[in-house]
Amino acid sequence: MKWAIVGLMVGATTVGEVLQAKGMRRHGEIRDFRPGAIGRALAVLARNRFVIGSIGAMAISFFAFLKLLSVTDLSFAVPVSAVTYVMETVLAKYFLHEQVNGLRWIGAALVVCGVMLVSL
Amino acid sequence: MSSEAARLRLKTWIFTAIVVLSNAFGDFFLKRGMPESASLVSPLDYIGMLFHPWVTLGVALLVLWQMSRMALLSWADLSYVLPVTSIGYVLVALIGKVLLNENISGHRWAGILLIMAGVALVSFGTAPSTHAHSHPAPPKAAQS
């Protein structure tokens, strides 16, 4: 049961965050942070299909996380989600076409190892 | 470093700080607000849970987290944002030690050091964006 929730959470998080990055990249750099401008940006983003998809996936991820918190500790629930780093970095390279150089691979690997150690 | 690169880097660090702090404290209040005996079975149980005061605060912080993260991703790479924002794990461990008097064991310190090394490598060693300003914002901003 616990691991089924973890699987659902990890899958939904990965899909949601990659779609979010895709949608925001397509929108372009946000430069104006006055309230009115933020409102207008949100209105534009509400019609961005990648952003819409990401919100759906992250809602699933969020409720899976709540469910997980009700059956395990935060110190288990948070670190176990580090698995998404590996999947998302791979997707960043092949789906988002980012230049993932050696430093970034090593950095991501260090982070995953570190998160596992912290959670032990 | 050109002034454009310096501007982007400073903006990236500011938003990274907002993303990390809102996420860490959002999760903290979420866990704090959930009753120990919570049974989440029907969809209504989940909705009702959102109206516990500390959970509401946690959710508000997590909304801020998502919005600042979206802004950050509008110019920075996902493969940059992911490792750099993981400094939040270190923050959570330190919050536990300082605020909750939790013990930080040897392997936990080792993990913290590894995370910090990874974050330092990516944040100082690579630029936030590899897309080289392929999306100048003005055309879209002008239409509204």
Image (tube, coloured by chain):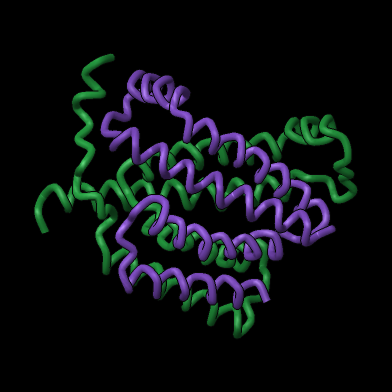
- Residue sitting at the far top: B144
User: As drawn, is B135 to the left or to the right of B30?
Assistant: left
- Give how far across and how far down residue B69 sits, in percent: 44, 43
Instruction: Identify the image quadrant of residue B83.
Output: bottom left
Q: Is residue B62 above or below residue B20?
A: above
- Is the C terminus of chain B in the top left, top right, bottom left or bottom right quadrant? top left
Which chain is purple in the rendering?
A
- Give how far across and how far down residue A96 sits, in percent: 38, 50
User: As drawn, is A25 to the left or to the right of B65?
Assistant: left
User: As drawn, is B88 to the left or to the right of A27?
Assistant: right
For image coordinates 29% across by 55% down, the residue present is: B128
- Residue sitting at the far left: B2
Which chain is green in the rendering?
B
For image coordinates 48% across by 70% down, the residue present is: A111
User: As drawn, is B54 to the left or to the right of A93?
Assistant: right
For image coordinates 55% across by 35% down, the residue present is: A53
- Is the N terminus of chain B in the top left, top right, bottom left or bottom right quadrant? bottom left
Q: Is residue A41 above or below residue A18?
A: above
For image coordinates 45% across by 48% down, the residue present is: B19
- Camera-side residue of B86 and B17: B86
Q: Is residue B91 visible?
A: no
Q: In this view, does A83 lie above or below B44?
A: below
Q: Can residue A34 be seen in this view?
A: yes
Q: In this view, does A58 lie above or below A71?
A: above
- Camera-side residue of A118 and A11: A11
